[in-house]
Image (cartoon, rainbow, N blue to C red):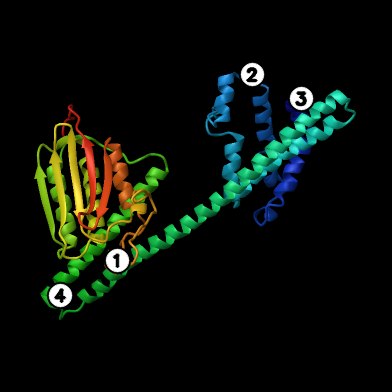
Amino acid sequence: MNLSVFIRNNLDAIVDEWEVFAKTLLPVAGTMSSLALRDHCREILLAAVADMQTRETDSQRAAKSQGNAPQGAGADTAATAHGALRHLSGFDLVQLVAEFRALRASVLALWSRRKSAGMTPEVMAGATEIEQITRFNEAIDQALAESVDSYSAAVTTSRDMFLAVLGHDLRGPLQAISMTGRLLLRPELPDTARREAAMRIQRCSTTMSLLISDLLEFMRTRLGSGIPLARTACDLGPVCTTAIETIRAGNPEQSFEEQISGDLVISADGPRLHQALLNLLSNAVQHGYPGRTISLVAKGADDGIEVRVTNFGRPIPETALQTIFEPLVRAPSPGAELHEQSKTSLGLGLFIVREIVAGHGGTVTVRSSVDEGTSFTIRLPRTHELPTPA
């Protein structure tokens, strides 16, 4: 009896073993009914049988081994439904993988015991091969379980850190806005103090707005949709000027300089590039020394446009330059002062910059030294066919 026929003829016994194992996945399984524990096991097995009995070419087999097999009817397969229901039941990723690991082991163990009854020496030789396959599957399953376990632990740690930092970074400016609001309620407050309070609220609001915007863009990229771009004929000169004015309004004590030269008209999403420049300028303010000028230089050439934002502060360590554009990466210099710590510590700003620039077919690089400061350079290719301005 081949394996596919064996599975079809012994569905009840296999599903019983699935349920017995599922009950061990405490605490979530302890309160589930037998029907809920069995869930889609029968349908998953029948789908596997149907697949095993379908002729398969070498190319199809290779694609399947690489995880590129075509999915079942739409997204409504028994396996996808099972995964969604296990999530709703409180199973974690490790427990979900363990169920399938146990299912495969149970099927092979039952099949091996059935084949061993009344075997001839020739058949026994074949059984030894089956045992070797079983042992190999067990080793791969163990490695998979260990990897998934460590992956899940890393995800949990990253999520907890993400939520803690998000709460901290939003609470700071929110408290400042609340305290400033109470200050503004005082009727005897002089006009100078009232203006300073209004500027403080504006700075805090800008900080929160940038953080929330970066968070939304990060979640969009993680959902696989990427950052949408709407290209038009765009002059980057006014985009650069507007970005500097926006940052200057929230940081009036900071000195900025701007140098614009050459043809800066390209096919691009102006608002998105404005967002990228805001992130770079905000990063420069957060990490630059107070009183040192932050510069924005934009140059147009025949083959493209280069925009560079430079600030002077503690240089970024060489080891951090390789990961600084990754999300949730924070690399403050050792011994950095309080004013040099990022106000939006989630580390999403530079990641968003990279995604926006990459969407335009460009690159963003960073150089950092004591003498030359820290410079982020965006290079955008020029397209000769410009769309009609919106």
Q: Which residue is mark 3?
A: 2
Please name the amino acid that badge 2 sits on: Arg
Which residue carries the number 1 mark?
A: 173
Hey, what amino acid is under mark 4?
Ala
Relative to 85, 366 lies left or right: left
Instruction: Report the front residue among 149 and 12.
Output: 149
The residue that appears at 35% across and 59% down in the rendered structure is: 345
* 47 sits left or right of 211 in the view: right
Task: Name the secondary structure under disc 1.
Answer: helix
How far is disc 4 from disc 3 in space, using C-alphas? 85 Å
Whether residue 279 is visible here, answered yes or no, is no
Characterize the local packing of mark 3: few (<14), some (14-19) or many (20 or more) Cα atoms within 10 angstroms: few
Location of residue 179 by image quarter = bottom left
**Circle on res. 193:** 4
Closer to the camera, 61 or 123? 123
Numbered disc in front, either 1 or 2: 2
Identify the mark nearer the N-term, 1 or 4: 1
Taking the image as shown, residue 160 lies to the left or right of residue 61, namely left
Label for residue 55? 2
The answer to the question of whether label 1 and label 4 lie on touching residues, with beta carbons closer than 8 A, is no
Residue at 61% x, 43% y: name it. 144
x, y percentage for residue 364?
27, 43
Q: Of marks 1 and 2, which one's residue comes earlier in the chain?
A: 2
**Which residue reaches farthest bottom?**
188
Q: CA distance from mark 2 to mark 3?
A: 15 Å
Quarter occupied by the C terminus: top left
Q: Give the residue type that dot 1 points to.
A: Pro
Element assignment for label 4: helix
Work out how far the residue at label 1 is from the one at label 2, CA to CA, in angstroms.
63 Å
Question: Could you tell me which secondary element the residue under label 3 belongs to?
Answer: loop
Residue type at tag 3: Asn
Quarter placement of the N terminus: top right
